[in-house]
Amino acid sequence: MIEMIDIGLADAIAYRIEGKITEKEMKTVLAIFRKKIKKNEKLIIYQEVVSIGGVEFNAMIEKLKFFLAFGLSHFSRIAVVTHKKWIHKLVDLEGKLFKSIEMRGFSKEEKDQAIEFLS
């Protein structure tokens, strides 16, 4: 499930992931991304990961189509908040691979720091 949340930053797209991600949910988030891109706005992402229970195949296809069409150049900063250590390692690796995007992982206790990082 992807649930849109408010973190108090007007420029940020913020959502919580818990359980399985559906195609419909993925399309909703990607539509928000597209809307900001059409306005020539950089994407500032706050992602709170409670749990990952899988992703529907068609959701992955939608995400792949988005990245093939738009690439990564529209992303500015990404903060991932989770208690899962393996996700922190993945975010660190992605930050090293995609140097044009500022990416950081934060623990649940560091949520305020994550929001500060995005502002």
Image (tube, rainbow, N blue to C red):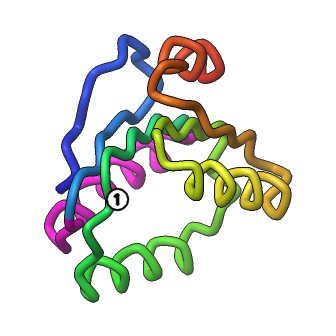
* Front residue of 43 and 4: 4
Q: Quadrant of the C terminus?
A: top right
Residue visible at 24% across and 65% down in the picture: 27
Relative to 92, 13 lies left or right:
left
Residue bearing the label numbered 1: 30
- Residue drawn at (34%, 59%), measured in percent from left and top? 30
For the N terminus, the image quarter is bottom left
> Is residue 58 positioned above or below 16 on the image?
below
Where is residue 118, by image quadrant?
A: top right
Q: The residue under label 1 is which amino acid type?
A: Leu
Q: Few, some or many C-alpha atoms within 10 Å of disc 1 (few <14, some 14-19, many ≥20)?
A: some
Looking at the image, residue 73 lies above or below residue 71:
above
Percent from the top left, x then y, of residue 63?
41, 73
Q: Which residues are magenta?
A: 20-43
Residue 13 among magenta residues:
no
Which residue is located at x 56 percent, y 80 percent? 68
